[in-house]
Amino acid sequence: MTRAFVFPGQGSQAVGMGKELADAFPVAREVFQEVDDALSQKLSTLMFEGPENELTLTENAQPALMAVSLAVTRVLESEGGFKLADKCDLVAGHSLGEYSALAAAGTFGIADAARLLKIRGQAMQAAVPVGVGAMAALLGLNYVDAVAVAEEAAQGDVCTAANDNADGQVVVSGHKAAVERAIEIAKEKGAKRAILLPVSAPFHCPLMQPAADRMAEALASVAMNAPGKPVVANVIAEKTADPETIRKLLVEQVCGTVRWRESVLYMKEQGITDLVELGAGKVLSGMVRRIDRDLTGLAVNGPADIESFLGTL
């Protein structure tokens, strides 16, 4: 087999996500109900109907995106009559998507994943006062050059590479003044574009340490099984199936760089040719060919996608 299932991160959310699944499949409705019950919140109503400004709040977007990914997973398993691990070699997820990947692979249940992501979203939002931090996309610079830009821009503040998404698509994160300096330096060094991102906190940088501490506490209390297939972890861009290693890496991920480009290239080295994105949007499948033109990306998120994909198995 040469397939990996991958799971999207924050930014893929949109009002209405998951509604077609819920309308078409009882098993999807069960997933959304389980998440609602775990959080004592009608998150599914917020997903289906909005308002958008509430859905995009980090503490809502993170469990909501996981819920859609797991609904797609459960529908595939139910309609196809298999376990996800039987149809792939590896799983991986972008930032919060790593929790979706682990839940899909059986490391922990949907309810635990929802509660962990609610805590993660709240802790990441609370770690830095609004307006103190920022993130910016540096487009047209490779990772090494973007790291150099961040180091030059820091000047005593925090400014680090937060997401290495694809060639020419790196995100930096840190104190707002330093990130603004990074934008100007990047332009001087030949970036095609350098723009502030509409995010509420500086994710995946050392300013998130209070959130990492909170996640260490939360993760310590959750039972974890070995995943049905290894997960390629964001912070090491390598596979692991050891529950205690996974627990440690999920804590490190809060402040660490999301090494997505390297993770995809690692999966190719492991023999993967097809990356199938389960959940909302098409961000990860869209990045695949930017990272390596030999790889194929496919997004599966609605009933028609599911029917089409099952027809290829």
Image: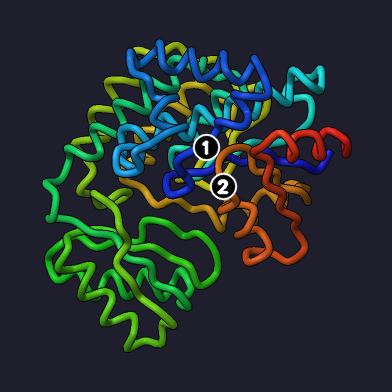
Quadrant of residue 177 within the rendered picture: bottom left
Please report the residue visible at 41 percent of the width from the left and 82 percent of the height from the top: 191
Relative to residue 59, is residue 307 drawn left or right? right
Please provide percent x and percent y for residue 94: 50, 45
Number of numbered labels in the structure image: 2
Picture layout, residue 76 above or below residue 189: above
In whole angstroms, how far apart are the C-alphas of marks 2 and 1? 9 Å
Q: Earlier in the sequence, mark 2 or mark 1?
A: 1
Q: Is residue 155 left or right of residue 70?
A: left
Query: Residue 244 bears which disc, if any?
Result: none
- Up/down of 309 relative to 227, above or below: below
Residue denoted by label 1:
17
Q: Where does the image place residue 34, in percent across and percent down from the top left?
A: 48, 13
**Towards the viewer: 312 or 153:** 312
Name which quarter of the figure residue 96 lies in: top left
Q: Amino acid at mark 2?
A: Gly
Amino acid found under the numbered disc labelled 1: Met
On the picture, is 67 further left or further right than 122?
Answer: right
**Residue shown at 38% from the left, 67% from the top:** 137
SS assignment at label 2:
loop
Give how far across and how far down residue 224 sits, in percent.
49, 15
Q: Mark 2 sits on what residue? A: 281
Determine the residue positioned at 58% across, 44% down. 238
Q: Is residue 272 left or right of residue 112?
A: right
